[in-house]
Image (tube, grey):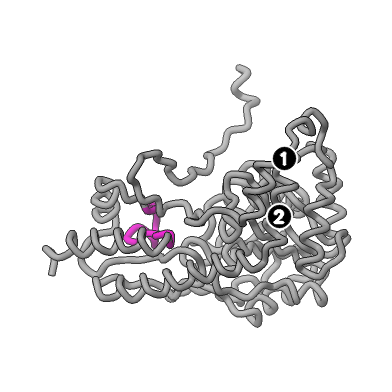
Amino acid sequence: MTWEDNVRKVVPYVAGEQPDKPDMIKLNTNECPYPPAPGVKRLAEEMDCGRLRLYPDSHTTPLVDALAEYYHVDPGQVFVGVGSDDVLSMAFLTFFNGKLPILFPDVTYSFYDVWADLYRIPYQTCALDSDWHIRPEDYKRPNGGVIFPNPNAPTGVFESLDTVEEIIAANRDVVVIVDEAYVDFGGESALPLLKKYDNLLVVQTFSKSRAMAGLRIGFCIGSKKLIGYLNDVKFSFNSYTMNLPAQLLGVEAVRDDGYFKETTGKIIAARERAKAELRELGFTFPDSRANFIFASHEKVPAEQIFAALREADIYVRYWNRPRISNYLRITVGTEEQMDRLIGFLKEYLDKYR
């Protein structure tokens, strides 16, 4: 026996490539193409660095209060973490401890199975239908918990609140997590269902619609009992998970609702225009309600297009995995970035007409 026999071995999550080239178009990690709200920049420039010698508020009170006010819930219903990945990981650790497998879609956010393996949680995947939608009947069986994104990643497909509620109502004996990382781009949040279901946890992030991926801010909203259990685990793990600048700058992002809606509106408009132009080029895709498009070309393999784009310093996301190996996930950028993408594709695909 060696020391390696006692090492916890897992296959890690692989994040999107993070290139750094002067004239690149980066459309591979679903970041916002616009800067954060003006108040965030102003406060960052004025921040008193002397405060950094002190520990931050371990309860992240300023940000929790701002989120509670914005979403019209009690502060005791809000939990904040270092990105929604931190929140989701903590939720897996806290709520998925039964002997039955947890359930999530077969094509979904690829961190779910990593956390399940890391925490030794049994799991089963439920196949999306041919149109990339969840089949609620697949979740009406004994399980240890349910999690799914809405809109889904990487497909961008949005499930109606009727479908979401059907799944929650069939699983009152376990925690159901709805991961709403992309809900601000045209989806409808499940937050109103919290009034009916104390086993529902809704998770969101500042990384996409609030343009703050670099600060790592995520949060969830649920019943006070669920949030209480999450805090118990957090304070058994690390009391000071979120730094002071992130807390204060996050508050500024929440306060500027006008800028938030203006930015998401621009991304939605660019997405819809890009859909029309991609269709003309021979691409097909589900109707995305996120800040990306999950596209497949009628003639040219996705891996080939991915390589050609990369050679031109245009980065999109590609996975060589079952069911999705002929799809590219294209983040929606600025109008100028999308013009460059479409222009390249027109020229590249012209020879295949």
Residue 91, placed above or below residue 224: above
Residue at 47% x, 74% y: name it: 129
> What residue is at 58 percent from the left and 33 percent from the top?
9
Q: Is residue 327 magenta?
A: yes
Name the residue that disc number 1 marks.
Answer: 47
Mark 1 burial class by Cα count in 10 Å: few <14, some 14-19, many 20+: some
Q: Quadrant of residue 44?
A: top right
Q: Position of residue 248 (x, y in %)?
A: 74, 47
Q: Is residue 139 left or right of residue 294?
A: right
Secondary structure mostly seen in magenta is loop
Residue that label 2 marks: 252
Of pointers 1 and 2, the one earlier in the residue sequence? 1
Q: Name the kind of residue labelled 2 in the image.
A: Glu
User: Alpha-carbon distance for marks 1 and 2?
Assistant: 12 Å
Q: Nearer the viewer, mark 1 or mark 2?
A: 1
Give the vertical position of 87 relative to 103 (above or below): above
Question: Which residue is at 36% across, 39% downward?
Answer: 21
Whole-percent x, y for residue 182 in the image: 57, 64
What is the quadrant of the C terminus in the image?
bottom left
Residues in magenta, as a range: 316-332
Residue at 37 percent across and 74 percent down: it is 273
Q: Is residue 124 magenta?
A: no
Residue 306 marker:
none
Q: Residues within 10 Å of mark 2 (few under 14, many from 20)?
A: many
Question: For residue 162, which quarter of the picture?
Answer: bottom right
Badges 1 and 2: C-beta atoms under 8 Å apart? Answer: no
Secondary element under disc 2, as helix, strand or loop, is helix
Residue 182 can be seen, yes or no: yes
Q: Can residue 151 be seen in this snapshot?
A: no
**Percent x, y for residue 76?**
87, 59
135 versus 225 height, above or below:
below
